[in-house]
Amino acid sequence: MDYSKMLSQLQKVQADAQDMENKLAETIYEGKSNGIVIKINGNEEVQEINIPEELMDDREMLQDMLLIAFNNAVEAYHKDREEKTSALTAGFKLPGM
């Protein structure tokens, strides 16, 4: 068992993981619902909200649509993060596994 090679692999995975985290933080994810668009970054911070003028009259519906759009944006972020994490760790093999 070559521990130096395994350590080198682990350090590369750590560096790649940090790079991935930085890229995710800079990525903008979009959630939509009935014309409402919410954009968040990879830190799950809202960056922008766009609401069509015609939705401004119905407060309850507007609140519901905002929740749906926000949750859609968060879901898009989590899906992207999961896919990138899986791809990052796909080639890393631990002994005995």
Image: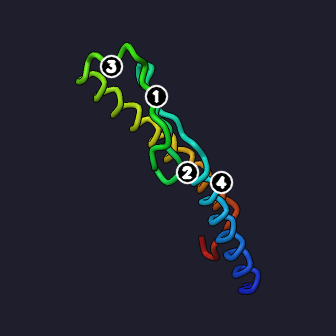
Mark 2 crowdedness (10 Å alpha carbons): few <14, some 14-19, many ≥20: some
First along the sequence among labels 2 and 1: 1
Mark 1 crowdedness (10 Å alpha carbons): few <14, some 14-19, many ≥20: few
- The residue under label 1 is 50
- Counting from the top left corner in percent of width and height, residue 96 is at 61, 75
Q: Which mark is residue 81?
A: 2
Report the amino acid beneath label 4.
Ala
Q: Residue at x 59, y 56 (%)?
A: 85
Report the amino acid beneath label 3.
Met
Quarter of the image where one finds residue 19? bottom right
- The residue under label 4 is 87
Report the amino acid beneath label 2.
Arg
Q: Residue at x 64, y 76 (%)?
A: 95
Report the amino acid beneath label 1.
Asn
Q: Residue at x 33, y 34 (%)?
A: 67
Q: Is residue 10 above or below residue 40?
A: below
Q: Nearer the viewer, mark 2 or mark 3?
A: 3
Cα–Cα gap, marks 2 and 3:
33 Å
- Counting from the top left corner in percent of width and height, residue 18 is at 63, 66
First along the sequence among labels 2 and 3: 3
